Image (spheres, grey):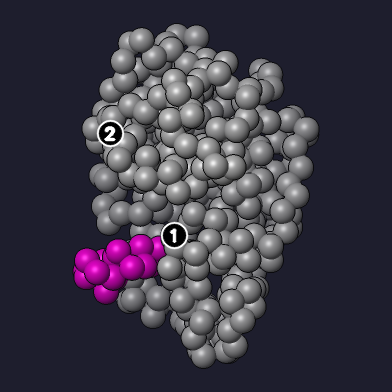
C-alpha cells in the first residue's frame, strides 16, 4: 500500500512519519512538503536505531510543493492520503480559508479517483460543548466560534462534495506531545511564580496524546470505513481543566507557583496587543484574537466513543506522562 502524507514537518504529521518509517505496512511513503531541506534535517536528527536517509531508498519520496497549490506529479498514485497539514494560527479569516479550505481541495483534486483520504480536522469545527450537555457528539449541530473552526468545517464540506465515500474526517481536541512547539508558552507560564488562567470559572477540555492520535490514524488507515459516517471525534483518557493543565505542566518541570484567574475582558485586550505586534504573534500565536474566541467558552469536551467502537481503538497514554514527554523533548531542543 502506498501512502501520501502531508504535514510531515509539522507536529502530528512529523510524529506519524517517524512511526511509519519503521512500519512495514506501507511500501512507499510520499511526502509533499514546502521545505524539503527542513524535512531532511529533521529526519537526520530523529531517525532511530542508527537509520539514515540513504537507507530509506525509494521507500520515502519527498516532493517539493509551493504554497497551497499541492501540485504533485501524475505519476504519484497513492492508495491512501492522510492530510495532516493546515493553518493553525492567523490574523484574518482569508488566511485560514485559503490554506484549510482551498488548499485541501487543491490536494484532493490532485489525487487519483481510487485514492481514499483521511483528513485531520478539529473539534473547533464542531464548536464548544452545547449548553446543558456533558460532551459534544457526532449528532450535535456544528457551531464553530472562530475563523479557524469555521475554515475546518468548510474544508470538511468541500472535501465531502469532492470525495464522497472516499473521505474519512477525524476531529481531535487539544493534541499534546513531543514536537509540539506551540506548548512552549504553556511551559514558560508554568515556570513563573504567578501563573494565569482565563476566566474565574473552571474550564473543561478533552485532549489526546499525539501518540494515541497516531494510533487512531493508523487504525483508520488499515480498516474498512463505515458506510454512514459523520465526522468522528477523538478523545484521550478523560478530560482536564485549565487549572490542571497549568499545574501539571509546572509539576513535570519542577516549578512552583500560584495560579490566578484573569477576566475575559483582559484576555481579549491582550489578544489585541498580540495581534498588533509581530514578535508577540510569533511568541504566543494562541493568544491572537481568533484563537482567543476559543478560550472564552468553559467547556470543550467531546465524545470519542463512536470512533473507538468503529475502529476498535482505545487511548492508552496518560496526561502526566504526555506532558513529561513534551517537556523532555522541548528541553532537548534547547
Q: Is residue 2 above or below residue 158?
A: above
In this rendering, position of residue 43 left or right of residue 246? left
Which image quarter: residue 184? bottom left
In this rendering, position of residue 332 left or right of residue 137? left
Query: Magenta span has 275?
Result: yes
Residue picked out by circle 1: 181
**Magenta residues, dominant SS class:** helix
Q: Earlier in the sequence, mark 2 or mark 1?
A: 2
Q: Which mark is residue 311?
A: none
Residue 287 point in image, percent of width and height: 38, 67
Q: Is residue 197 above or below residue 124?
A: below
Q: Which mark is residue 68?
A: 2
Which image quarter: residue 113? top left
In this rendering, position of residue 108 left or right of residue 310? left
Residue 13 point in image, percent of width and height: 48, 40
Residue at screen point 55% across, 32% down: 21
Mark 2 packing: few (<14 Cα in 10 Å), some, or many (20+)? some
Q: Nearer the viewer, residue 27 or 192?
A: 27
Q: Nearer the viewer, residue 217 or 137?
A: 217
Q: CA distance from mark 2 to mark 1?
A: 22 Å
Q: Nearer the viewer, residue 59 or 256?
A: 59
Please identify the residue farthest to the front as the structure is shown. Answer: 50
> In the image, which residues are magenta?
273-287
In the rendered image, the quadrant that contains the C terminus is bottom left
Residue 316 point in image, percent of width and height: 75, 49
Residue at screen point 69% across, 66% down: 320
Residue at screen point 57% across, 56% down: 177
* SS state under label 1: helix
Disc 2 vs disc 1: which is toward the camera? Answer: 1
Residue at screen point 76% across, 42% down: 314
Mark 1 packing: few (<14 Cα in 10 Å), some, or many (20+)? some
Amino acid at each position: 500500500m502506498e501512502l501520501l502524507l502531508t504535514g510531515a514537518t509539522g507536529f502530528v504529521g512529523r510524529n506519524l512519519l517517524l512511526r511509519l518509517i519503521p512500519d512495514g505496512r506501507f511500501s512507499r511513503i510520499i511526502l509533499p512538503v514546502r521545505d524539503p531541506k527542513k524535512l531532511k534535517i529533521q529526519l537526520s536528527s530523529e531517525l532511530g536505531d542508527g537509520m539514515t536517509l540513504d537507507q530509506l531508498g525509494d521507500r520515502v519520496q519527498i516532493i517539493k510543493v509551493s504554497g497551497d497549490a499541492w501540485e504533485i506529479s501524475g505519476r504519484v498514485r497513492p492508495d491512501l492520503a492522510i492530510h495532516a497539514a493546515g493553518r493553525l494560527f492567523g490574523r484574518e479569516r482569508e488566511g485560514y480559508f485559503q490554506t484549510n479550505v482551498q488548499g485541501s481541495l487543491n490536494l484532493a483534486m490532485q489525487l487519483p479517483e481510487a485514492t481514499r483520504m483521511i483528513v485531520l480536522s478539529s473539534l473547533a469545527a464542531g464548536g464548544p460543548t452545547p449548553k446543558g450537555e456533558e460532551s459534544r457528539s457526532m449528532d450535535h449541530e456544528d457551531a464553530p466560534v472562530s475563523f479557524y473552526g469555521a475554515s475546518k468545517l468548510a474544508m470538511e464540506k468541500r472535501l465531502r462534495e469532492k470525495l464522497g465515500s472516499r473521505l474519512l474526517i477525524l476531529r481531535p481536541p487539544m493534541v499534546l506531545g513531543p514536537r509540539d512547539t506551540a506548548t512552549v508558552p504553556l511551559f514558560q507560564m508554568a515556570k513563573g511564580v504567578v501563573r494565569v488562567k482565563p476566566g474565574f470559572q473552571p474550564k473543561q477540555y478533552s485532549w489526546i496524546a499525539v501518540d494515541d492520535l497516531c494510533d487512531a490514524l493508523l487504525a483508520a488507515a488499515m480498516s474498512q470505513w463505515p458506510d454512514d459516517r459523520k465526522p468522528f471525534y477523538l478523545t484521550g483518557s478523560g478530560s482536564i481543566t485549565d487549572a490542571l493543565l497549568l499545574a501539571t505542566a509546572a509539576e513535570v518541570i519542577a516549578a512552583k507557583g500560584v495560579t490566578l484567574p484573569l477576566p475575559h475582558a483582559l484576555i481579549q485586550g491582550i489578544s489585541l496587543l498580540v495581534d498588533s505586534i509581530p514578535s508577540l504573534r510569533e511568541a504566543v500565536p494562541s493568544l491572537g484574537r481568533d484563537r482567543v474566541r476559543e478560550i472564552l467558552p468553559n467547556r470543550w469536551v467531546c465524545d470519542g466513543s463512536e470512533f473507538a467502537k468503529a475502529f476498535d481503538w482505545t487511548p492508552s497514554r496518560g496526561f502526566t506522562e504526555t506532558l513529561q514527554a513534551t517537556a523532555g523533548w522541548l528541553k532537548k531542543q534547547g
